[in-house]
Amino acid sequence: MGRSQVVVDGASLAIGDLVRVARFRDKVELSKESISNIERSRSTLEELARAGKIIYGVTTGFGALSNTRITLDEASKLQTNLLRSHACGVGENLSTDVVRAIMLLRLNTLAKGLSGVRMIVAQSILDFLNEGIHPIIPSKGSVGASGDLSPLSHMALAFMGEGTVEHRGKLKSASDVIKEVGLKPLSVSMKEGLALNNGTQMSTAVGALTVHDAECLVKTSEISAAASLEALQGYTQAFDARIHDARPFKGQIDSAHNIRSLIAGSRLIKETVSGEREAAQDAYSLRCTPQVAGAAREAIAFARRLIEVEMNSATDNPLVFPDGPDVLSGGNFHGQPVGLAMDVVSIALATIANISERRVSRLLDATLSRGLPPFLVGATESQGLHSGLMAVQYTAAALASENKILAHPATVDTIPTSANMEDFVSMSPSAGLKARAILQNTQQVIAIELICAAQGLDFRDPAKCGRGTRAAYLKLRENVPMLREDRASSGHIQTVADMISDGSLLEAVEKSVDSLR
């Protein structure tokens, strides 16, 4: 992708835009209307505060301390203290793409003109994005209640010249990098600490990237399923469009269409049973692939809709409405929509791993694989001496089983915080991080299936594959040679998982089959 410009206006940011900024470092600018809205919102907040209106987090303390009054002279200290006290995250640091997505989403929220910040706050985020300055943000510490307070506080402190950032591949102090690139540290004023750390941007950033990757992964799982179908010399009847039109879920119809496109021209599969002793139909893990992958597609589409609404929402508190004029306290920072979306994605991806692992087992089991050698090991004389791909199914089983544990919904749990003022929390960050872990596990399960299916095709004849599966086979064989004697498989599994993650395998297939949905 080229280094184009993403214009932020608070209303039209899409997941594709976020991916461009987060992973491909596209530049960012604010729309003129957003600049005007930010300035108008700030002017309204200042007028109301000076008129003596009681405003949560501006003329009061926070959370359970909201009954404590704060003078305007103390406003800057209050906001600074808020960010410092809430920067208490722990655990593994968030990846750079997630950090960039967080900053972009926070900027997009400010661009709506409901947060009451000065333009300099939005400009600080813009400068960090365009200069490639990335705050170091621990991944754990938010319950998705008053938003993702802890991770967003770590982000905000970096704008103030505090903490550590990554810049040009090196970890440095935020103050040194700000000076190095010719910027000035941000000094927060009234409401601005709240406007930076009150919101769902960490949960939504993880969610948006996961939805994007999940869409690619499900399509890739249809490629692996098609390759397994050929290696197992399965039947095509179950993918007939008439069957799927009779149950018109879009995801199912699209999945069946993709498999038909991938195996088009194949000489390894059969339309229907041809021998008296053959089973009349394939096992569910083959025959029901469109139903399972299609359901996952529907679930991910649901999550995409929720995530893209959240990406373009005002999620801090209170919100400033210049047309009132008024400042209203509410609960848009609550991460329930994002957490629920990610719980659904977790379940969907766990089922993709489950059915893939069953196809792996079938490929390796000589009693079920329709003539393939046990564990896809080579010549008869080497069987017993070599274990072949026996053990990769153990790994697939372990990953699929771990997914079942991780797929337990985070949003059905809650734990009170802030002296029971925040007595029902969303756990949306946990939901997002779990979904991300399941996604990575499932990428590795699909990688294992692709390796096994390619090995099975070697025993048939790869030249007889369909157009799409042939392209997948050739792409995989560029990096993973046929197994002829026992070897360690970890590196090859990760190589193929990386090809799934970066989209290169899918891209190679789509060049040969341009009708994938």
Image (tube, rainbow, N blue to C red):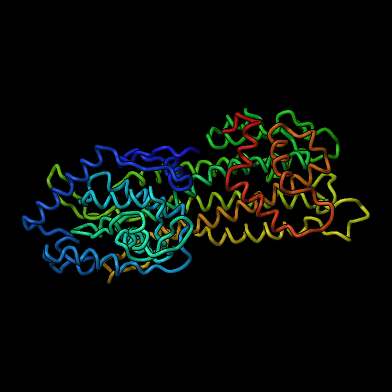
- 227 or 511, nearer to the observer: 511
Tell me, yes or no, if residue 508 can be seen here.
Answer: yes
> Hey, which quadrant is residue 511 in on the image?
top right
Q: Name the residue located 11 percent from the left edge and 65 percent from the top edge.
A: 71
* Residue 127 in the image: above or below residue 274: below
Relative to 106, is 429 on the left or the right? right
Q: Name the residue located 22 percent from the left edge and 65 percent from the top edge.
A: 62
* Residue 380 in the image: above or below residue 243: below
x%, y% of residue 337? 38, 51
| Image quadrant in which the C terminus is located | top right
Tell me, yes or no, if residue 303 can be seen here.
Answer: no
> Hey, which quadrant is residue 322 in on the image?
top left
- 302 or 440, nearer to the observer: 440
> Hey, which quadrant is residue 193 in on the image?
bottom left
Extreme residue toward the left, this view? 51
Relative to 379, is 45 on the left or the right? left
* Residue 96 in the image: above or below residue 226: below
x%, y% of residue 479? 71, 47
x%, y% of residue 293? 59, 42
x%, y% of residue 248? 54, 32
Q: Name the residue located 32 percent from the left edge and 46 percent from the top edge.
A: 108
- 415 or 35, nearer to the observer: 35
Relative to 339, is 512 on the left or the right? right
Extreme residue toward the right, this view? 381
* Residue 491 in the image: above or below residue 22: below
